[in-house]
Amino acid sequence: MKQKIGALLAALALAVSAAACGAPGASVTPTPVPAATPAPTPAPEQIVRPETQPAFPATVTDAAGRQVSIESQPETLVSGYYITTSMLIAMGQQDKLVGIEAKAASRPIYALAAPELLELPNVGSAKEFDLEGCAALEPDLAILPLRLKDAADTLTELGIPTITVNPEDLEQMAQTVRLLGQAIGAVEEAQALLDDNQATQDFLEQTLAGAAAPRVYLAGNSSYLSTAGGAMYQNALIELGGGENVAAGLTDTYWAQVSYEQLLSWDPEVILIACDAGYTREELLGDPQLEQLSAVRSGAVYAMPSGVEAWDSPVPSALVGSRWVASVLHGDAYPFGQFQADAAEFYRNFYGFEIDPALLPDPLAW
Amino acid sequence: MPGSKRLCVRFFAALVLTGALLLLSVAVGRYPILWEEVLEDTLSRRVLLTLRLPRTLMALTAGFGLGVAGGTYQTVFQNPLASPDVIGVSSGASAGAAAAILFLDGGLACVTLAAFTGGFLAVLSALALASAAQGRGMNTIVLSGIAVNAVSQALLMLMKLAGDPERHLAAIEFWTMGSFADVTLRHFLAVLPWAALGLAGLLLLHRQVLLLGLEPDEAHMLGVPVQGMRYLVLLLATLVTGAVVSVTGLISFVGLLAPHIARLITRSSRFSTVMLSGVTGGALLLASDILARSIGSSEVPVSVVTSLLGAPFLFWLMCRREAGHG
């Protein structure tokens, strides 16, 4: 009996030590696949195909550093991420979509620009991706967020070319647009979107040059005691719009919780409320703990419109958000009426619809 | 009908039901597999071999493993409410998975390894604490498990606090709901040896497992080194549970419920009951996974289904016992 126990204990010890040393992980590690193998030094979304070659077959390097070969121009696409779905609409490729991410109904831009997308099958979300559902659509190309790298590897094993993207800031958003343009054969459309974004950045820099930057607090959508620090995209949104983010010193890469005391010590001149906030401007203004804030006393609390797209995330229309911030903070240099006209032009050019002015109410008129 | 023959018939019926659910699980899914094409190199074949079959086998293995481990825990602890949570494997695995999601790349391989290691370390800590306390009763192990659980939960809360609410926190919460959605052949093959090792050990020690259900003095008189054997059996059951949940995330109720159903069928506490717990667990989890992938437009976490199925059954069992049937 003791021998039996001893043998089993030895086997267990071996099992535990092997587990700690990574044995199961080694066997779980994705096996090399023919179409998409990890590059030795990942260079996110760098296009390796020389411009002089024919568009297809093409090999692109995605956000995970995987080299993905695409034999011919994809005719059918699955987008598992709302940002790439929006990019594909902005590039005029929505007709190629055969499946998109879950909860599409929560994205008003789809209903405005491409309502047919709401009828497409959904392939789940980054939390619960539907591998079989995606395979059933048999797309020529699947586009997934970097968080779904494992799913991308599995789809590639199934024979479905799949790229991952990681648009976390303006630079990565531009890289993603370029990658999509190459991968789907819409380089010109991608470039048009990038040129427009660059023109908007240049315009804002010139228009707001020399203007004093007010101290701005961006109240997060879950609570007005959460905000975006300097490492987040929202910091660029504020700075491009001519403001100074009072929370720029925070190094968090996600919405950080702050205390009343912290907010009172920052004493922002302007408070901007993020898109889709779970509270109202009136609730924030009515909070007795905040009544001493400069922004609250002057009523300089403005909610970012939520009826079109979440401009406080790196979507293709993110710079429309910076235009909105500029018109709120620097109405003299960039009147709200001009913002409305510019936003309408952007959506007309890239999303093909006339925006209802009611979706862009003048915050200074509240 | 003699008792043993009746037991054989019931065991056979449970096997047939599990087999039927296995076939149904292979047949049901989002991808419309063209069965006439599966012998050729088609997408149908690749979906079947890479996704559908491994998922089905993983659900069966997970259910069988959790059922046997649950039956073992209940026997060893002499407590019908005992489950892997008692000595910290679930909370340890959760803390391990959360650490991988938060501090490492959060990929499936990484989370699997971290969860497995976390679960095992938690149980080793609980058993080491119990050993250091020099207590010889099961209460010492249970109290050590509670202490380790508390520490694991505290670590888990700290990691949730440190994580991005939209990315890390969501991923951690989702992991604790369990899912077979991303199980592929390589994940199944990676955990199979560990689960098989634990199950083989429990099978080899089936007599000792039963004797541990007796009073310690009786077990000792029958030649069982009680303390060492308890630790070994608990480690084997933990190996099975840890291997399963490291891939699937936490799965509620199966480890608790399957042994009760098995006892209801056999009306005894023999080792065949522990084995039947495994078969019942497999059937429960196969059925739950079929529902999880079929009832909505998106997949539902499997613990939602197992909890919704398990809670009313447990209530029924409780009423039955109160009425004097159990």
Image (cartoon, rainbow, N blue to C red):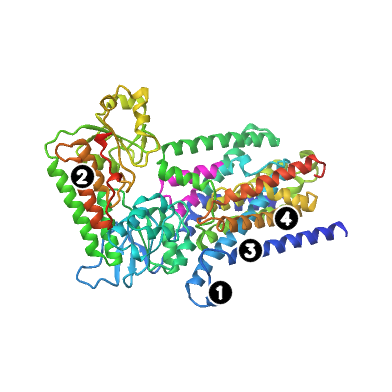
Q: Amino acid at mark 1?
A: Trp
Q: Whole-percent x and y of residue A153?
A: 42, 62
Q: Amino acid at mark 3?
A: Leu
Name the quarter where the C terminus of chain A is drawn: top left
* Distance CA(mark 1)–CA(mark 2): 58 Å
Point out which mark residue A339 bears.
2
Local SS, label 2: helix
Looking at the image, can residue A43 be seen? no
Q: Whole-percent x and y of residue A123?
A: 45, 59
Q: Please tell me which residue is depicted at 69% across the width and 55% down the height of the picture.
A: B280
* Distance CA(mark 4)–CA(mark 2): 70 Å
Nearest-to-viewer mark from 4 and 1 = 1
Residue situated in front as seen by the camera: B7 or A144: A144
Q: Whole-percent x and y of residue B149?
A: 57, 37
The chain carrying label 1 is: B
Mark 1 or 3, nearer chain start: 3
